[in-house]
Amino acid sequence: MTDWTVRGLEIKTQAERPVVYSPEERRRRDQTGWTLVQGILAPVQFVVFLVSLGLVLRYLLTGDGLAVAGWSVVIKTAVLLLIMVTGAIWEKVVFGQYLFARPFFWEDVVSMLVIALHLAVTMAWFGWGLHLSDQSAMGLALLAYASYLINAAQFLRKLRLARQEVRHA
C-alpha cells in the first residue's frame, strides 16, 4: 500500500503502521536489560497478587487475618510501584519517553488508575488521611486488584500483538 502526504504530513495506511514496535524500537527492546527486568517482575507481581488476593478474601469472608491481608496489600503496592518505575525506564529506552508512548498509551493510563487505587488502600492501611473501616479498605483492595487484572490483560494483549507483528514481518 502507498503512503499519502497531505500538507507535509505523512500518513501510513493501517497495514503499514506497526501496531507495537517499529524495527528500531524492537531492536532497542531486544537489546536493553530492562526488558528482562520487566519479564521477571511481571510474573513476580502476579504471584504476589494471587497470594494477597487470597489473604484479602480470607479476611473479608472470615474476619481473620486482617494484619496479614493489610501487609500483603502494602507488599503488592510496593511491587507494583517497582514495576512501574522500571517500566517507565524501559519505555524511555525503547520509545524515547518515560510514559504514555504511542503503543502503550492506554496501558499507561489504566496503570495510573491501578496505582491510585493501590496507594489509596495503602494510605487507608496506615491511616494517612484516608480513614476507612477495615472492611472498606479491603473492599477497596479488591477494586484495586480488579483494575490490576484489566491492566494485566491489556499488557498481555499487547505482548500477543507484538509477537504477531514479528511473525508477519
Image (tube, rainbow, N blue to C red):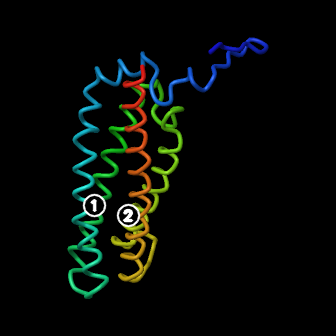
Amino acid found under the numbered disc labelled 1:
Phe
39 and 69: which is toward the camera? 39
76 and 122: which is toward the camera? 76
Q: Position of residue 147 (x, y in %)?
A: 44, 60
Residue 134 versus residue 76 in the image, above or below: below
Tag 1 and tag 2, C-beta contact below 8 Å: yes
Q: Position of residue 146 (x, y in %)?
A: 41, 64
Could you say which quadrant of the image residue 87 lies in?
A: top left
Residue drawn at point x = 34 percent, y = 70 percent = 126
Q: Position of residue 158 (x, y in %)?
A: 43, 39
Q: Which residue is mark 2?
A: 145
Residue 79 is labelled as: none
Question: Neighbour class for label 2 at 10 Å: few (<14), some, many (≥20)?
Answer: many
Label 1 or label 2, whichever comes before in sequence order = 1
Quadrant in which the N terminus is drawn: top right
Residue 49 is labelled as: 1
Quadrant in which the C terminus is drawn: top left
Separation of residues labelled 1 and 2 (CA atoms): 8 Å
Question: Neighbour class for label 1 at 10 Å: few (<14), some, many (≥20)?
Answer: many
In this picture, residue 71 sits left or right of residue 164? left
Residue drawn at point x = 37 percent, y = 38 percent = 159
View extreme (bottom): residue: 62
Q: Position of residue 168 (x, y in %)?
A: 42, 23
In this picture, residue 50 sits left or right of residue 120? left
Residue drawn at point x = 39 percent, y = 68 percent = 121
Amino acid found under the numbered disc labelled 2:
Tyr
